Image: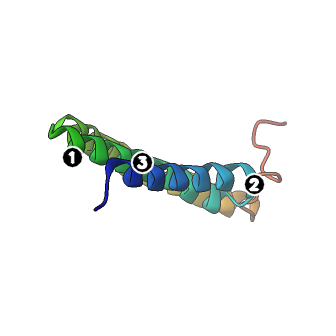
């Protein structure tokens, strides 16, 4: 039997992998995918609590998080592509757009 603890444990592991990817990797695409993994881990926790409590409130939050994530993907990938076209790299250490 799969319990709430199993779902929350999996969610914590996925979130930890996402945080590690954001902190360790220097490629903007990998960082972007790690952020999406963290959002999906939060979604899993919302769904697990919604199922455990037999309430649809968590599912409503998941819907809004998915909508925000879809907008983030569209805007974020456009920014990453624009930076790659201008700079020729997506390495976050080499991108310093705020400097003159």
Label 1 or label 2, whichever lies nearer to me, is 1
Residue 83 appears in the figure: yes
Q: Residue at x 32, y 53 (%)?
A: 3
* Label located before the other in sequence (3 or 1): 3
| 74 sits to left or right of 93 | left
* Disc 3 target residue: 8
Report x, y in % for residue 53.
20, 37
* Disc 2 target residue: 24
Query: Tag 2's secondary structure?
Result: helix
User: Is 8 in front, or is 69?
Assistant: 8
Q: Residue at x 73, y 58 (%)?
A: 25
Q: Quadrant of residue 63?
A: top left
Report x, y in % for residue 19.
63, 48
Which quarter of the figure is the N terminus placed in?
A: bottom left
Q: Residues within 10 Å of mark 2 (few under 14, many from 20)?
A: few
In contact (CB < 8 Å): disc 2 and disc 3: no
Report x, y in % for residue 93.
82, 51
* Disc 1 target residue: 51
* Label located before the other in sequence (1 or 2): 2
Query: Tag 3's secondary structure?
Result: helix
């Amino acid at each position: 039997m799969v319990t709430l603890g199993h779902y929350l444990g999996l969610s914590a592991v996925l979130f930890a992998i996402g945080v590690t990817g954001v902190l360790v990797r220097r490629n903007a695409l990998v960082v972007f995918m790690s952020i999406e993994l963290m959002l999906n881990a939060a979604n899993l926790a919302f769904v697990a609590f919604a199922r455990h409590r037999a309430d649809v409130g968590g599912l409503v939050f998941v819907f809004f998080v998915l909508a925000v994530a879809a907008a983030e993907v569209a805007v974020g990938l456009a920014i990453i592509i624009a930076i790659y076209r201008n700079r020729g790299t997506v390495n976050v250490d080499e991108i310093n757009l705020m400097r003159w």
